[in-house]
Image: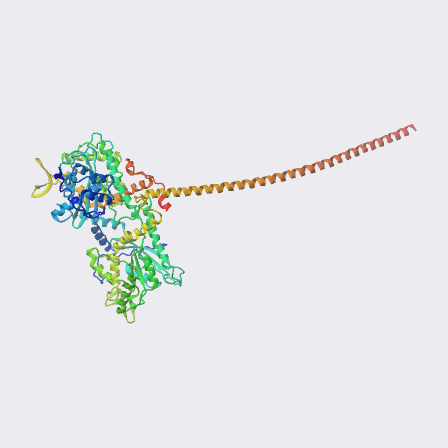
Amino acid sequence: MADTAKTTHPQPAGRPEKGAEFGYVGIDAILEQMRRKAMKQGFELNIMVVGQSGLGKSTLINTLFKSKVSRRSVMPSDEERIPKTIEIKSVSHDIEEKGVRMKLTVIDTPGFGDQINNENCWQPIMKFINEQYEQYLQEEINISRKKRIPDSRVHCCIYFIPPTGHCLRPIDIEFMRHLSKVVNIVPVIAKADTLTLEERDFFKQKIREDLRVNEIEVYPQKEFDEDSEDRMINDKIREMIPFAVVGSDQEYQVNGKRLLGRKTRWGTVEVENTAHCEFAYLRDLLIRTHMQNLKDITSSIHYEVYRVRRLNENNTHPSDQPNGHSNGVPTHEVLSHEM
Amino acid sequence: MAARWRGVYPALERAFTLTATECCWAKVTNITSNSCFPCLAAQCRHVKPVTKSFLVTRLGSQSRRCWRLSHSPSLAHIIHSCSRGSRDTKEQNARSLTLSGHVGFDSLPDQLVNKSTNQGFCFNILCIGETGIGKSTLMDTLFNTNFENFESSHFEPQVKLRAQTYDLQESNVRLKLTVVNTVGFGDQMNKKESYQHIVDYIDTQFESFLQEELKIRRSLHNFHDSRIHACLYFIAPSGHSLKSLDLVTMKKLDSKVNIIPVIAKADTISKSELHKFKMKIMSELVSNGVQIYQFPIDDETVATINTTMNGHLPFAVVGSTEEVNVGNKMVKARQYPWGVVQVENESHCDFVKLREMLICINMEDLREQTHTRHYELYRRCKLEEMGFKDTNPECQPISLQETYEAKRKEFQADLQRQEEEMKQSFVQKVKEKEGELKESERQLQAKFDQLKRQHAEEKSVLEEKKRALEEEIFSFSNRRAAAELLNAQTLNLKKDKDRKK
């Protein structure tokens, strides 16, 4: 029914005065409209931090968002006990910068890797992530559904690797292997100020090697690069992961400026100095350049995989299936066929 | 111990208000711990039932048991946003945390815009109006290109819709524009069914989007959205009022699509007549309950201009792709012996207003309204029609999965039945055929037997004859032998007689 006739008619750029120019249509004003709409609606971001206790997760999150957003800051500080099982605690905040409002949810997992027997430590976390997908799916398939489905899906999972300097431990490999299929994992080397630069490079190389051998795809995943420009940018990032970070929420005076850092007797580690640690790269990746991309990959790839698997099942609840193998093999489009 | 917890959840100690967009809680004025929490738990859809019991236990002692509320993460973050909000309200009268430095997520809108620019946009306009009223010309003028159009005949038996898709580009924005024209609208003698084709077309587009959304393996972001975002309804410039066809059509379409009425060929109406005409049209629309698209006034940046424009509806437009020299510039205009009507002159017609509203300011809102209002309504009706419900008669939420399962079973049963039927009829046919074959076999056999018998009979007859013949020959040869013997005997006798002489 539609005859497709392609007429490309390049228009002169720029917005002319009212009623003056002949030839201006105004299609590019849609960008402005989109921006307005986005600002009005606000954004949502859900970050999960996973790692053993004492690796500086809460501090890093506070440093990333330059405010006290982590669980430690919100809970009364006598909760120092190490939990007996893995708990999942999520804390939400509304933050705003230059008119852009964002609802940031930080999901913490105290108790990960702290038990004596850490087998299946990834299961509660996997269950939590799948529950978020399930919630979204249920809302999406409702008959009368909300205008804007609240998005509680985990967009990014920051995994903290302790700075042993050798290689990845079995728990790291197990965890990342299972979870890289359902969520974007960004591995970071925590407390990187205990490693010298050579040790750091060696460690990173070992880690990348381990990831490659175990076929673990961390963010940015190679297969989701859209075009060569993306690939170039992401290749640069892939050469740098995992980022060696140092977190701090205290300011010190360095060279006449007040900077975030860790002060020791032999010097001050500046958090935002790229010669000292790679915190700035992590922040740029997560917030300034790839935030939308993280959300897109979560919603259009990981969530869709979950949805396919779920809609092909026969009414079993997703929490009964701890194995998150995301390669469901759907055979046909049952639903549209039935309808 | 209680002291430690006091003030941590101050909001829970007072009253709830709606904070996040997830939950809809009522403002509970009667505050005892038992009344707050069931209310909260019942209305907050994300809370798992198990926490109900915890909630009801008193917050008053604020013991560690209360802490386990956070096992349900959504409840945890609701409580925290709630409590944080109230805490901050005490401090700085704002709900947000202040950042102590530049974090950088203010680039998020840019990231979003960049992504959308890479993908491109799509926009679909439906033009409804009588043949020859100037729909194609207006589209050409609006988008400043020459869409390949040809004049339609006035003799179409039915209203048809012709959709054409174009790729336009302006600076770095790519737009996939689809223009759908109604062909033959208002030309038939009996116009009762005119609107039906249009409604069906719109529904088909919604249906294809719904199908894609319901697929198991879907690709929504690559899907070419063909739903109609805006409908320009062209009103003939009679100067009096709307035609009944217009009213009927617009009434049928107002819940399915954003209708923007325009007065076509506005250069035939004088200014005073135009004003009266516009008032008449708007009052008729209101009195008939037709909901046309109102430009949104909730966003402060565009509220003022949208409100003014809302007052100018319907826009009186003139379309022209020809250029005329006015002053020392070439402008789009229509040249008459008595003057030149300039398309882009605001005192001549409302074309610039239409372009401003349709494209420059509200295109995104049109798309959003189509998706969140009209499409959702269609989806809801369609799914309910198919028998899906959100809650079963006991008011427990049914998962769509269960309904799918039920439907699937029904479908399978149906299939089974049909298969059985087919099998039966097949068996039947086989039997019949077999019977027939047996019958003909028997007949053949009988014929064969008969022939054989005939053959045998004839053979025996022939045998008889042959025997008779042989007997005759035998007797004949006997007689001949006898005759020869006799002959020979007489000859011998004669010889003897001669010798004796």
Q: Residue at x 22, y 54 (%)?
A: A32
Query: In the depicted view, which residue is nearer to us: A85 or A17?
Result: A85
Q: Is residue A331 visible?
A: yes
Q: Is residue B45 above or below residue B179?
A: above
Q: Is residue B251 above or below residue B118?
A: below
Q: Is residue B97 visible?
A: no
Quadrant of image for the N terminus of chain A: bottom left
> Is residue B121 toward the left or the right of residue B500 in the image?
left
Residue lying at the far left of the rendered structure: A256
Q: Position of residue A301 (x, y in %)?
A: 28, 43
Residue lying at the far top of the rendered structure: B500
Which of the 4 image quadrants contains residue B155?
bottom left
Which of the 4 image quadrants contains residue A22?
bottom left
Q: Position of residue A89 (x, y in %)?
A: 20, 39
> Is residue B499 toward the left or the right of residue A307 in the image?
right
Which of the 4 image quadrants contains residue B347?
bottom left
Query: In the depicted view, which residue is nearer to us: A152 or B391?
Result: B391
